[in-house]
Image: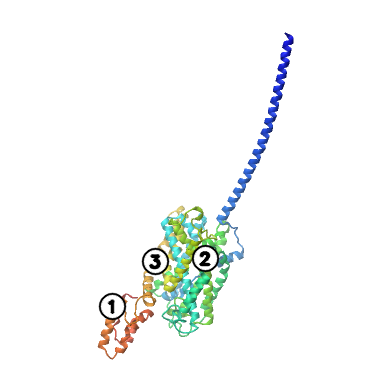
């Protein structure tokens, strides 16, 4: 029994040892497998971590690129460059039309009105910059996303029409410079035109061809650029040209026969003086250009530098406009032309100033087309005519490049804008009327209404309604309404009168010597015929009276004086009836 028990215990011990060794082997295998799996998991986690870090870095880089973040450059060279860029936008064609505005309201009243408009524009610009700082937006298009759709559409349409009208005025001034250049080559409609010779055409035929060729060869390729970075270096050249032009206007003495016959009154209170308001408003309608130009300085750390640039730009702009307005109006009085360069003696120095203006505006015209394209795309995006995706919604004006997916659309829109502005400059070449229409409508929206609305939507809601800035915003809105209400009726009357007096495409007098195409033509023809029948001695003179009066209407001659010159042969009031009395 003992031996059996011993053998049983020995076999049990051997079996236990075998199981123990098997368990130890399994444990060692499990440890090795766990170790290998741990190493694999560590390698996988490390690779995922590296991939996630690279992805985050790439997204951060893309985000920085999308935000166009730049380290603020507060060196003197950078600040001067920014100031020149802004001056190139604030000193535009309105500078040349300011003497006529002063001549309409008097030199003292014009100065007071100009200072008042400047003060309101400067204050509204500060409100606009505060709204930009609060929302981190740097364009009117970006700020429009913070207001109602109706107000945003109004601002976008006003911006589009303002920049389009500005491009038209650039082409008109360039065409007039070409006309003056060709007038020195010969006489007749081929070489001579209306700006300086009161010819039947505003441009000479040769100048018209030069304008079309210059637009097609020079302006169109520049307008097709997707980025305006290439033109930033031209701001200094453009401002040099404008400074030279201002110096020519200020230092060129008027010819004896063109100088003002009597001193210009200090103040003129008349309906015509209201036409000065929109021109003055147009001269400072440049608020939308400041936020993108000041993007790198638009932060609390560099706010002092930003205000220094803004103040310098605005005060230099005021000085240039005040100098040209006073000198031009006091030198030529009521005889000053809408473009003050047309009133100056046409010497080689004045011709050089015209060519300098052409060069300056040639660099600014593509920017106007660029801005028109941006606001047109914003209008289409808001109307859901183009995709509203996040990456292709609306390009901000301060973006260095357009992100237009369809190159054909970009080219087509650019050519449409350039071609339509050229057509408008040919058909309607009156810059005084252009400034009046823009100043009474789009300029007040961009200069006063938009900054007030943006500040109210982004900042003003935090203040009580009695806060001075909120009250000032209401003052801006009221001032805008007053400018539109007081000036637009006079501007519209002046535009219609100009169409009947100067536009060659308005049907008035036929080549046969009658006015049957005009509403008063039949009455005038009867008056001429009855006067000719009663006075046979004056028959030869009255035979062409209808044609003479038709030409008088086109040239803006005083009909009363013309009636006296015809020795009473025609009763002008009776001949023209109600139509003549309605004309200003």
Residue at 52%, 63% (x, y): give it.
Answer: 290
Q: Earlier in the sequence, mark 1 or mark 3?
A: 3
Quarter of the figure that contains the N terminus: top right
Q: Position of residue 390 (x, y in %)?
A: 50, 53
Q: From the viewer's perspective, is residue 288 above or below residue 336?
A: above
Q: Nearer the viewer, mark 1 or mark 3?
A: 1
Q: Label 2: state its secondary structure.
A: loop
Residue 94 has which mark?
Answer: none
Circle 1 crowding by C-alpha within 10 Å: few under 14, some 14–19, many from 20 = some
Residue under pointer 3: 484
Q: Tell me the residue that label 2 is attached to.
A: 224
Please state the horizontal and vertical placement of residue 583, each as a whole percent of the image: 33, 75
Q: Nearer the viewer, mark 3 or mark 2?
A: 2
CB within 8 Å, label 1 to label 3 = no
Is 475 placed above or below 2 here?
below
- Residue beneath label 1, please? 577
- In which image quadrant can residue 109 be found? bottom left
């Amino acid at each position: 029994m003992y031996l059996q028990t011993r053998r049983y215990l020995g076999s049990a011990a051997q079996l236990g040892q075998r199981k123990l060794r098997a368990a130890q082997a399994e444990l060692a295998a499990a440890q090795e497998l766990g170790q290998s799996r741990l190493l694999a998991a560590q390698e996988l986690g490390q690779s995922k971590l590296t991939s996630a870090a690279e992805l985050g870095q790439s997204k951060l880089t893309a985000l920085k690129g999308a935000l166009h973040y730049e380290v603020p450059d507060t060196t003197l060279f950078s600040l001067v460059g920014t100031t020149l860029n802004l001056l190139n936008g604030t000193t535009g064609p309105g500078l040349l039309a300011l003497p006529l505005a002063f001549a309409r309201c008097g030199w003292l009243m014009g100065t007071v009105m100009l200072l008042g408009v400047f003060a309101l524009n400067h204050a509204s610009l500060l409100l606009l910059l505060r709204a930009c700082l609060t929302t981190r937006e740097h364009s009117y298009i970006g700020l429009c996303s913070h207001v109602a759709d109706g107000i945003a559409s109004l601002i976008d349409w006003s911006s589009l029409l303002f920049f389009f009208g500005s491009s038209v005025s650039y082409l008109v001034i360039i065409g007039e410079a070409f006309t003056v250049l060709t007038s020195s080559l010969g006489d007749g409609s081929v070489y001579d035109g209306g700006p300086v010779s009161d010819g039947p055409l505003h441009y000479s035929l040769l100048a018209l061809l030069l304008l079309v060729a210059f637009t097609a060869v020079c302006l169109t390729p520049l307008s097709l650029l997707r980025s305006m970075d290439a033109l930033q270096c031209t701001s200094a050249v453009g401002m040099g040209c404008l400074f030279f032009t201002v110096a020519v206007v200020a230092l060129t003495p008027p010819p004896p026969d063109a100088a003002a016959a009597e001193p210009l009154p200090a103040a003129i209170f008349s309906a015509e003086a209201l036409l000065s308001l929109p021109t003055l408003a147009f001269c400072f309608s440049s608020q939308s250009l400041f936020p993108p130009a000041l993007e790198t300085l638009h932060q609390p750390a560099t706010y002092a530098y930003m205000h220094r640039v803004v103040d310098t730009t605005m005060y230099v702009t005021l000085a240039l406009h005040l100098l040209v307005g006073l000198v031009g109006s006091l030198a030529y009085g009521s005889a000053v032309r809408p473009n003050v360069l047309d009133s100056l003696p046409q010497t080689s120095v004045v011709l050089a100033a015209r060519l300098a203006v052409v060069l300056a505006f040639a660099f600014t015209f593509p920017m106007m087309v660029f801005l028109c394209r941006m606001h047109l795309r914003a209008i289409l995006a808001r109307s859901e005519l183009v995709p509203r995706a996040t990456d292709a919604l609306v390009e901000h004006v301060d973006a260095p490049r357009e992100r237009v997916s369809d190159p054909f659309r970009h080219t087509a829109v650019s050519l449409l804008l350039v071609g339509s502005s050229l057509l408008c400059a040919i058909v309607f070449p009156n810059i005084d009327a252009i400034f009046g229409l823009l100043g009474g409508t789009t300029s007040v929206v961009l200069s006063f209404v938009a900054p007030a609305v943006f500040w109210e939507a982004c900042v003003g809601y935090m203040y009580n309604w009695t806060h001075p800035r909120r009250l000032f915003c209401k003052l801006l809105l009221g001032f805008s309404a007053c400018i539109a209400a007081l000036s637009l009726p006079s501007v519209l009357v002046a535009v219609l009168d100009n169409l009947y007096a100067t536009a060659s495409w308005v049907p008035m007098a036929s080549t046969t010597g009658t006015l049957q195409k005009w509403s008063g033509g039949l009455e005038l023809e009867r008056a001429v015929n009855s006067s000719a029948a009663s006075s046979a001695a004056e028959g030869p003179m009255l035979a062409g009276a209808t044609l003479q009066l038709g030409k008088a209407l086109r040239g803006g001659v005083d009909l009363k004086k013309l009636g006296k010159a015809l020795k009473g042969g025609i009763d002008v009031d009776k001949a023209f009836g109600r139509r003549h009395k309605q004309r200003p």
